[in-house]
Amino acid sequence: MPPKKSKQPQEVAPTDQKSNAPQETNKDDSQAETKASAAVPAKRKANTKDAPAKAPRRSARGANQLPPDAVKLVNYLLSPASLDSCRPKDEIEHVKDRGDHLRTYSSSTFTPFEELMCAVILSRPISHALGLRSIRTLFNDPHNFTTPKKIRSAGFEPVIKALNEARTQHRQKTAEELIILADAVVDHLGDGEEDVSLEKVRRECGHDWEKEKTMLKTHVKGLGKTGLDIFARRVQASWPNLYPFADQRTLSGLQKLGLPGTAEELKQLLDDHWSELIVEDLKGDQDEKKRRALVQVLERAVGVDLEGNADTVRAEAAPNTG
């Protein structure tokens, strides 16, 4: 389980039990998503010298150990039916009140700039629920802080007002980091106040993720390893050079569902069964659809894990399998 977040002396916000991530040592990366841990079994000697050598045990389910309902499980994660299992309760109620047009981290397609905003927000030591509530509040009416221009034009007070409405924690620091992010995009990472593609980063770094990470971390305050992992996991739908990517926190969620334990194995599963998958609602050509399918499975898996619904999802995905 992720560690409990520390109390902040000047801000009061609801306490949620499920943390989006444990803290890391980097002061600009205080939100770390929990790494999966696996005990390594001690080796035992064979009873006889003629006994065949056993293959080493894998610490995660791989392609050779998938349950027979793996494709059904993937299709379930790709379907709207899985959304409530990966959403905090308050988001479920918010969607019911506002309708399906409400932009949420769980179900909406975001621009690279919006994904970078989300990575900064989710790098804070706050719970899954508070992080997602902050994103919903910022990205929807009446605030709609979705471009550098909108954030810069509004200034600090409206941004912190939106975060106050979200009843989240670390509001002042988060607001400051979002203002700095908007300035960084205009000055270093983008092509003007309206640019949300961050293509300048890709051009200047030659589509090399190691260089892109360095450029982003240099100019985006509050973005450390965890935030970069969150950003890469999501933005690979638009940045093919990252595909396939999955961070360790997300792989833990996949393993609990019985799905492949590496990004490459999950990609191979999608490729092998592509004709069986329900992907009509995903946009783009086939290559982009495959990237978006991988991102959606990853995001739903980690959400299901954070909400503690892995057993429920496995049962609902294939109710007639044992």
Image (cartoon, rainbow, N blue to C red):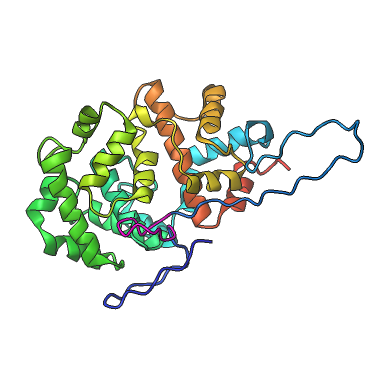
Q: Quadrant of residue 143?
A: bottom left
Identify the main secondary structure in magenta. loop
Return the x and y of residue 70 as percentages of the image width and height. Answer: 62, 35
Task: Please state if 58 lies on the left or on the right of 189 as rendered.
Answer: right
Return the x and y of residue 100 as percentages of the image width and height. Answer: 34, 48
Return the x and y of residue 282 as percentages of the image width and height. Answer: 39, 31
Task: Please state if 229 lies on the left or on the right of 47 as rendered.
Answer: left
- Above or below for 6 versus 93: below
User: Which residue corresponds to the image point at 47% horizontal and 45% vertical from the top-left?
Assistant: 300
Range shown magenta: 21-32
Residue found at the far bottom of this picture: 9
Q: Is residue 273 magenta?
A: no
User: Which residue corresponds to the image point at 40% horizontal and 61% vertical from the top-left?
Assistant: 129
Q: Is residue 27 magenta?
A: yes
Q: Nearer the viewer, residue 100 or 183?
A: 183
Q: Quadrant of residue 233?
A: top left
User: Which residue corresponds to the image point at 81% horizontal and 32% vertical from the top-left?
Assistant: 53
Q: Quarter of the image containing the C terminus?
A: top right
Residue 102, can we see it?
Answer: no
Return the x and y of residue 85 as percentages of the image width and height. Answer: 50, 52
User: Which residue corresponds to the image point at 16% horizontal and 43% vertical from the top-left?
Assistant: 185
Residue 242, can we see it?
Answer: yes
Give the total of numbered labels.
Answer: 0
Task: Please state if 36 lies on the left or on the right of 66 as rendered.
Answer: left
Q: Quarter of the image containing the N terminus?
A: bottom right
